[in-house]
Image (cartoon, rainbow, N blue to C red):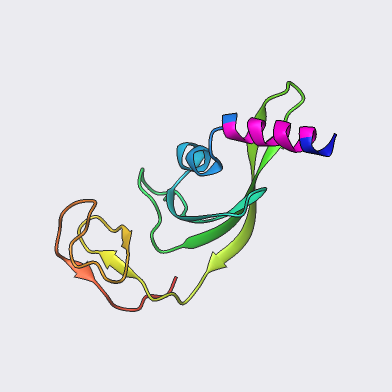
Amino acid sequence: MKSLLSYVEQRIDALRTPIEDEIEANAAGEVLDIENHGAYAIVRKHPPDPDDDGVNTEITSLYHVRREPQFDGTESLHWAYLGDVHNNAQTRCETCGRTLDDDVDTCPHCGSDDVDHSDTEE
């Protein structure tokens, strides 16, 4: 019986949209990193900028995200705010403002080579 239950759970998980894809599709702001831990994910992202249509690159927030069943049988993502991340060394594109890997000299998003490798406080 346990093996049957395990098989059914694996099949259900295989048919689901990966949580990373759901997070990317539904997140407000810019998702920087997703750590998938199976039953939940830890998400680092820049929130939307309240003053315009972009994102607030001055803040990096951390969230615990999990799937939550609804009464109608569907699932939605439940976002729990964990706090803001501070004092991170970051590489940022000076043209488009996106966060980059530390070893990048050219922005893969906009093609600019105006990349700032300095430490910033968030």
Compared across the picture, whether 74 is left or right of 19 comes to: right
Instruction: Reply yes or no: does residue 55 show up in magenta.
Output: no
Identify whether 18 is placed above or below 48. above
Q: Is residue 71 above or below residue 66?
A: above
Q: Residue at x 70, y 37 (%)?
A: 68
Q: Is residue 69 visible?
A: no
- Mark count: 0
Left or right of residue 106, residue 68 in this image: right
Rendered residue at 55%/41% (across/down): 19
Could you tell me which residue is drawn at 59 percent across and 55 percent down? Answer: 63
Q: Is residue 11 visible?
A: yes
- Kindly indicate the quadrant of the structure image that contains residue 113: bottom left
Q: Residue at x 37, y 75 (%)?
A: 120
- Identify the image quadrant of the N terminus: top right
Residue 57: % across, % down: 38, 59
Which segment did they paint magenta? 4-14
